Image: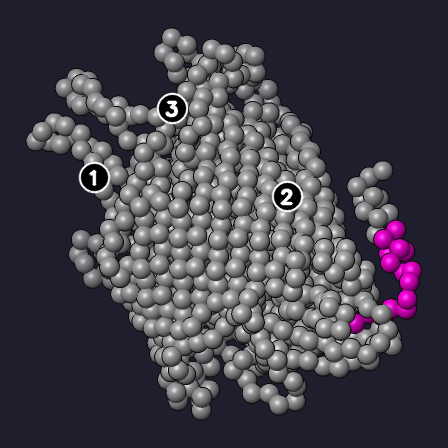
């Protein structure tokens, strides 16, 4: 029986079983922002009399099936007024709710408390959600609001240092994070080599980070999922908002295509610091800037059908004296169709295109270099609200990949450079999944599922053949690994299967509610990653090259278990989350000493398959309401890698012993606070402290032809100094905003208040006077004051 038939059989069986018992009816609908018709994700819809409820999906839809009767429906969402409404449920009812923001006065509904608290009953764990309003209040470098920098304040999340791109989750690599923008994959999430993220905060509606207990609908990465959705656009009226900063500005416009039915959104950002370079005679031919564009069209065809077309395009441009130009960035496009088959069955069909491009124009040597990765994804997801106790998610998807490891083109006909193309690579990754949310009793809730993923490495490619199928040999005399010499080659035609894999990926989460204030949760998930990032840095760079799994490069297989304790107390004013986890990753790539990664036609000759393990304890204490709120997080963790010898003769990497991975941070402390003094002034502060990044230092030196050459010790047995900084911000909102359409605010911030000189790197060089090797620390930021102006009308 095929996976599709199995899913169909389970759905029919479970639906039939749920039909027995007392007479039941379904309450369903969509929950939207009353001022914009923007659908709201994750809104709580609760029936207090039954102590049950549901949350809206990614498109604002909810459905709950309960016994016939009279009930109170409570609707609550962070940043909005909570409402209560009485209903008489004697038939299926479709009821759409409008929520008003906390800024809006409302008299027609009953207002109840709206607090940010842990959902202790839901089996969801290892998940963090941040509102855009909270992110915008956080002080950041140069005053630029940054989505990615904000998640670094969460437990279990670190980065590779100041000015580094990407992020690390629970000891995993930055390449092991699946980053989605409106379901499209973002392969490089940073502008300006990590100083800013590619996400325009004005265009973002919802952000959710999964560190563990990952639902079965996600796949393809071994560590985490960062799922980001853009706004739909305002279908009630035309509005503009934006901001003007020291080095960049942004603007976003949204409005109706057809009032209350269709909307558009278009937003852009651009930096302009490079314009100041033109004022300098020495720098006038140099440039460094970025720009991006967010777009979205939404249209409601009827009560059961909606269409969405969203896109993103971004580029970074660096140019030195017109002889060196570097351009890179992402482009995505997604066409989605929401269809409501019934009040219990919601579906979403998506056609997705994603592209990451990297280009170099080296005029001084006469050639251009292009590389990148592109994918085409079709996915069909269903959510079946079978009853108030049982819900099913299931679906299929297929991704076709095109990899361009490098194309060399001559800059002009007289350059003497010939056209050259490294073999392009192709792959296909289909998957099918099913996931159930099951409330067993008033105290026990489960979420369990299964993902079946497949991967096909496809031609057109020429593959090297090696003796004993071994592209890396071990020189026992010198105790080093060396590249093997191919004994032949084999060519595969376009789309011919070269290698295939398939894996079952089980997922399981459980919540046991001790009482109304506290619960214990546990989870397990297996994730398989078929794409590998070839990089010799701890932080992703624009030149990093993605490659598919093949006969030499095995898929990464991650298994993670987690156990947590969750508590709300003092009438839900405070929350405490404590989690411990253990994760193992098979087939984590490691590199032989002296590996050359750039433009390498035989990458298999410099890599070895190793393993990674990480474990830790995460604590997060949060104040949920009041003028003063925020959180304190602490993570105690360990991340290690091992590449043992393949035979008894081989020593392996680092003598085959476990060693610190470059993502290992023993201690990680983050504090974020906000204080609303009055309607005019609000303040925010962040403090971050983490153990220094593992590095390898010289343990001695030797003389070679009169030059002192450093001799390095075992991998990553040393560390950079501890990393920490304190940032503050103040927001001034003029009181005259209330009485006019144009509303503005000034944000004043200071990054690194006490001028901590954090080490971005420590390099070693020979001192010209003494001849000895010396360490040189590189720091990027000192104290950085900034001011920006945000507006909307």
Q: Is residue 359 visible?
A: no
Give residue 776's mark.
Answer: 1
Mark 3 vs mark 1, CA separation in Å: 23 Å
Residue extent of the magenta highlight: 12-28
Mark 3 vs mark 2, CA separation in Å: 36 Å
The answer to whether mark 2 and mark 1 are in CB contact below 8 A is no
**Residue on which disc 2 sits:** 524
Magenta span contains residue 15: yes
| Residue at x 78% of width, y 77% of height | 71
- The x, y position of residue 111, in whole percent, is 62, 83
Give residue 722's mark.
Answer: none
Q: Using the rendered view, name the quadrant where residue 300 is placed.
A: bottom right
User: In this view of the protein, which residue sits in the foreground, 15 or 357?
Assistant: 15
Answer with left or right where residue 349 lies relative to residue 769: right
Q: Using the rendered view, name the quadrant where residue 259 is placed.
A: bottom right
**Residue on which disc 3 sits:** 593
């Amino acid at each position: 029986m095929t996976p599709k038939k199995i899913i169909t059989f389970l759905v029919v069986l479970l639906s039939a079983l749920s039909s027995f018992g007392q007479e039941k009816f379904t309450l369903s609908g969509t929950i939207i922002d009353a001022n914009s018709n923007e659908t709201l994700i994750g809104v709580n819809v609760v029936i207090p009399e039954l102590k049950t409820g549901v949350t809206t999906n990614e498109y604002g839809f909810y459905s709950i099936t309960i016994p016939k009767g009279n009930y109170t429906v409570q609707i609550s969402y962070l940043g909005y007024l909570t409402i209560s409404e009485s209903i008489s449920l004697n038939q299926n009812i479709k009821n759409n709710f409008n929520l008003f923001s906390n800024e809006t006065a409302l008299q027609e509904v009953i207002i109840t408390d709206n607090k940010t608290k842990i959902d202790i009953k839901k089996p969801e764990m290892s998940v963090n959600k941040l509102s855009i309003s909270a992110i915008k209040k956080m002080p950041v470098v140069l005053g630029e609001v940054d989505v990615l920098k904000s998640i670094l304040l969460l437990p279990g999340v670190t980065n590779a240092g100041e000015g580094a791109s990407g992020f690390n989750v629970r000891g995993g690599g930055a390449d092991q994070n699946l980053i989605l923008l409106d379901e499209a994959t973002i392969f490089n999430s940073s502008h300006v080599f990590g100083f800013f993220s590619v996400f325009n905060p004005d265009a973002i509606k919802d952000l959710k980070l999964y560190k563990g207990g990952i639902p079965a609908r996600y796949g393809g990465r071994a560590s985490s999922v960062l799922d980001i959705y853009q706004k739909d656009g305002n279908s009630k009226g035309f509005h503009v908002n934006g901001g003007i900063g020291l080095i960049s500005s942004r603007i976003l416009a949204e409005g109706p295509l057809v009032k209350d039915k269709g909307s558009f959104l278009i937003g852009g950002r651009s930096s302009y610091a490079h314009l100041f370079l033109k004022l300098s005679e020495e720098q006038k031919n140099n440039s460094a800037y970025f720009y991006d564009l967010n777009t979205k069209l939404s249209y409601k065809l009827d009560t059961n059908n909606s269409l969405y077309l969203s896109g993103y395009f971004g580029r970074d441009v660096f140019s030195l004296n017109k002889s060196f130009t570097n351009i890179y960035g992402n482009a995505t496009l997604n066409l989605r169709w929401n269809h409501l088959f019934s009040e219990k069955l919601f579906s979403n069909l998506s056609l997705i295109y994603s592209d990451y491009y990297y280009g170099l124009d080296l005029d001084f040597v006469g050639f251009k270099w292009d590389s990148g990765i592109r994918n085409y994804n079709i996915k069909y997801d269903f959510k079946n609200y079978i009853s108030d106790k049982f819900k099913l998610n299931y679906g299929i998807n297929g991704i076709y990949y095109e990899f361009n490891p490098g194309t060399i083109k001559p800059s002009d006909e007289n350059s003497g450079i010939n056209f050259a193309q490294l073999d392009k690579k192709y792959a296909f990754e289909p998957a099918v999944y099913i996931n159930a949310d099951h409330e067993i009793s008033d105290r026990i809730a489960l979420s369990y599922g299964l993902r079946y993923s497949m991967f096909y490495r496809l031609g057109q490619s020429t593959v090297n053949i090696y003796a004993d199928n071994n592209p890396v040999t071990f020189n026992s005399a010198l105790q080093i690994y060396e590249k093997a010499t191919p004994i032949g080659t084999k060519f595969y035609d376009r789309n011919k299967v070269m290698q295939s894999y398939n894996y079952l990926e089980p997922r399981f989460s459980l919540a046991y509610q001790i009482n109304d204030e506290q619960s214990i949760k546990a989870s397990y998930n297996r994730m398989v990653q078929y794409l590998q990032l070839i990089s010799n840095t701890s932080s992703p760079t624009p030149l990093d090259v993605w490659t598919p799994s093949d006969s030499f490069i095995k898929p990464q297989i991650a298994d993670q278990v987690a156990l947590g304790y969750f508590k709300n107390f003092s009438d839900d004013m405070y929350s405490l989350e404590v989690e411990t986890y253990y994760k193992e990753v098979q087939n984590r790539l490691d590199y032989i000493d002296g590996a050359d990664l750039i433009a390498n036609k035989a990458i298999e000759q410099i890599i070895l398959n190793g393993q990674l393990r990480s474990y830790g304890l995460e604590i997060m204490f949060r104040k949920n309401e009041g003028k003063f709120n925020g959180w304190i997080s602490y993570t105690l963790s360990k991340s290690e890698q091992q590449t043992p010898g393949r035979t008894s003769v081989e020593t392996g990497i680092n003598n085959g012993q476990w060693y610190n991975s470059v993502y290992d941070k023993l201690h990680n402390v983050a504090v974020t606070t906000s204080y609303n003094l009055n309607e005019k002034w609000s303040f925010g502060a962040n403090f971050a402290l983490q153990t220094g990044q593992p590095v390898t230092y010289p343990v001695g030196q030797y003389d070679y032809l009169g030059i002192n050459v450093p001799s390095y010790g075992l991998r990553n047995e040393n560390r950079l100094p501890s990393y920490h900084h304190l940032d503050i911000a103040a927001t001034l909102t003029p009181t005259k905003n209330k009485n006019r359409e144009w509303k503005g605010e000034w944000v004043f911030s200071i990054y690194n208040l006490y001028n901590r000189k954090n080490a971005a790197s420590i390099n070693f060089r020979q001192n010209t006077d003494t001849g000895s090797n010396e360490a040189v620390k590189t720091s990027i930021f000192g104290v950085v004051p900034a001011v920006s102006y945000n507006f909307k009308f």
